[in-house]
């Protein structure tokens, strides 16, 4: 799908004319360096220098340890500071697959949760603000 985005969207329209989102598959990380490798490959395949939205994808309670160990939120924050992403957050599949309080409480307490997308009342992803 990334190659299709490049051919059908990026090559045909100016970058400022569309918003583009992608996600970091946290569950596939084997080391912290994988995050940069994956991001660089995503940019290359899509043919862009930045993404408008970047999500740590499909987090569940098992992935929480990887997020902490590899400082995935710090990585996303760094990308935002470098202008390589505009917004970041995380996605998951419903309340049963993630202990929401582990992720949300720090952001809710500090008012850093800037938005949420849901489907039929089930939260799917949250955008974070710095």
Image (cartoon, grey):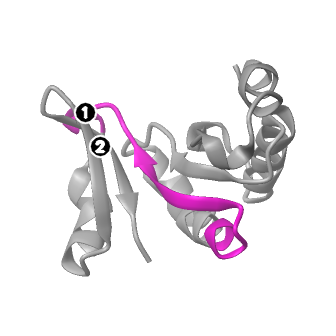
Q: Residues within 10 Å of mark 1 (few under 14, many from 20)?
A: some
Image check: 98 left or right of 18?
left
x and y, in percent, of residue 89 in the image: 45, 55
Q: Quadrant of the C terminus?
A: bottom left
Of helix, strand and loop, which one carries label 2? loop
- Give whichever of 50, 73 is nearer the camera: 50
Alpha carbons under labels 2 and 1: distance apart: 7 Å
Mark 1 falls on what kind of element?
loop
Q: Say which residue appears at 27% left-offset and 49% top-offset.
A: 116
Q: Is residue 121 magenta?
A: no
Q: Quadrant of residue 91?
A: top left
Q: Which residue is mark 1?
A: 94
Q: Name the front one of labels 2 and 1.
A: 1
Q: At x 66% / y 49%, what residue is drawn?
A: 16
- In the depicted structure, whether residue 85 falls above or below residue 92: below
Magenta stretch, residue numbers: 78-97
Front-lying residue, 45 or 104: 45
- Residue at x 75% of width, y 18% of height: 4
Instruction: Give residue 72's position: percent from left, percent from top.
Output: 58, 61
Q: Which mark is residue 98?
A: 2
- Examine the structure image and report whether residue 81 is included in the region drawn in magenta: yes
- The residue most toward the left is 121
Disc number placed over residue 112 in the picture, else none: none
For the residues bearing labels 2 and 1, Cβ distance under 8 angstroms: yes
Is residue 88 placed above or below 8 in the rendered structure?
below
């Amino acid at each position: 799908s990334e190659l299709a985005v490049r051919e059908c969207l990026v090559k045909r329209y100016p970058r400022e004319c569309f918003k583009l989102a992608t996600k970091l598959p946290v569950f596939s990380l084997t080391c912290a360096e994988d995050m940069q490798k994956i991001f660089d490959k995503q940019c290359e395949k899509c043919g862009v220098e930045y993404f408008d939205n970047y999500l740590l994808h499909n987090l569940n309670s098992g992935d929480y340890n990887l997020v902490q160990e590899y400082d995935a939120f710090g990585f996303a924050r760094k990308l935002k500071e470098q202008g390589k992403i505009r917004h970041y957050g995380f996605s998951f599949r419903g309340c049963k697959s993630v202990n929401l309080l582990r992720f949300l409480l720090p952001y809710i307490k500090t008012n850093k949760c800037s938005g949420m997308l849901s489907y039929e009342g089930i939260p799917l992803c949250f955008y974070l603000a710095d």
